[in-house]
Image (tube, helix red, strand yellow):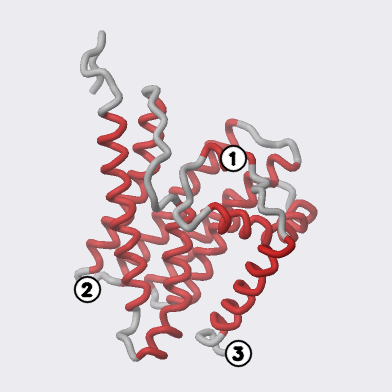
Amino acid sequence: MSSEVFPAYATGFLVASFVLFLVVGDRRSSDPTDSGRGSFALGSITREWFYWLMTPLQRLAVRILPWPTAFNVGGALLGLLSGYLFATGSVIAGGWALLASGVADIFDGRIARARGMDSPRGAFLDSTLDRFAEVGALAGLTAMYIDTWLAPMATLGLGGSLLVSYTRARGESVGVVCKLGVMQRAERILLLGLGAIFDPLITRSLGWQANSVLTAALLATVAGTVGTALFRTVWIASRLPTTSASAEE
């Protein structure tokens, strides 16, 4: 089966599973950490469907690889692999590796809670290694586009992705919680991963220039992440006092 035809079959499977979920699935998210996340731009029902779809794999993962840290590390390695694949021109494989990195990120926390192994160290490794994965993927896209105007766009997307997380974390450190905005990690992975996977199929079918779909996904990621980071900066700053007993660098 051609690697460019397979996404069409994958699309059919995903659409059929979504319809089945709407008919028989439990539409209540089973992940207790959802309350600590921002809004999901693609809709909460999309997230709930994805968790439902991943449940059989999660149960299998608990049996064969019960250490959550393995998924933390595996997700980071898959993100770095996706960057290498993008940089060497293997766009479809890079997209699959990026999506697999996102699945590993979902599994680590859920397996930790299922086995009673969640801890501050695990939470730290989870969020930190996620950043390694994103740096790898977007650095690979930068290398892929190195001779075009999209190279600085990919670099900007990398900075924006890190700033979305940083602004929230820095705000919480000074007592202001901000979960507003779009383009959180799930959206970024889905946009870039699916954009890479479906790019050859769509561009050839419509006669577009190669990488047009991936480019659109990248630009949407840049706009969403930079916009969210700027919004959170202003929103958090407006809720902080302008004077303090001690100054901070």
Q: Amino acid at mark 2?
A: Asp
Q: Percent x, y for residue 182? A: 39, 50
Q: Is residue 21 shown above or below 167?
A: below
- Residue 229 appears in which quarter of the rendering? top left
Answer left or right for 112 relative to 84.
Answer: right
Q: Which residue of the protein is positioned furthest toward the right in this rendering?
A: 63
Q: Position of residue 42 (x, y in %)?
A: 48, 58
- Taking the spot 41% from the left edge, 30% from the top edge, the residue there is 177
Are there few (<14), some (14-19), or many (20+) residues within 10 Å of tag 2?
Answer: few
Residue type, mark 3 in image: Met
The residue lying toward the viewer, choosing from 191 and 166, is 191
Task: Name the secondary structure under disc 3.
Answer: loop
Compared with residue 95, is residue 73 higher up or lower down, i.e. above or below?
above
Q: Is residue 47 above or below residue 146?
A: above
Q: CA distance from mark 3 to mark 1?
A: 39 Å
How far from the left and from the top, in percent, is residue 200? 42, 83
The residue under label 1 is 33
Say which mark, if any, is on residue 147. Answer: 2
Q: Is residue 176 left or right of residue 219?
A: right
Q: CA distance from mark 2 to mark 1?
A: 41 Å
In the depicted view, which residue is nearer to us: 171 or 80?
Answer: 171
Residue 1: mark: 3
Which is more foreground, mark 3 or mark 1?
1
Residue type pointed to by label 1: Thr
Identity of the residue drawn at 54% across and 87% down: 5
Circle 3 packing at 10 Å, graded few (<14), some (14-19), many (20+), is few
Q: Is residue 147 left or right of residue 175?
A: left
3 or 1: tag closer to the N-terminus: 3
Secondary structure under the numbered disc 1 in the rendered image: helix
**Do the numbered discs 2 and 1 sit on residues whose CB atoms are within 8 Å?**
no
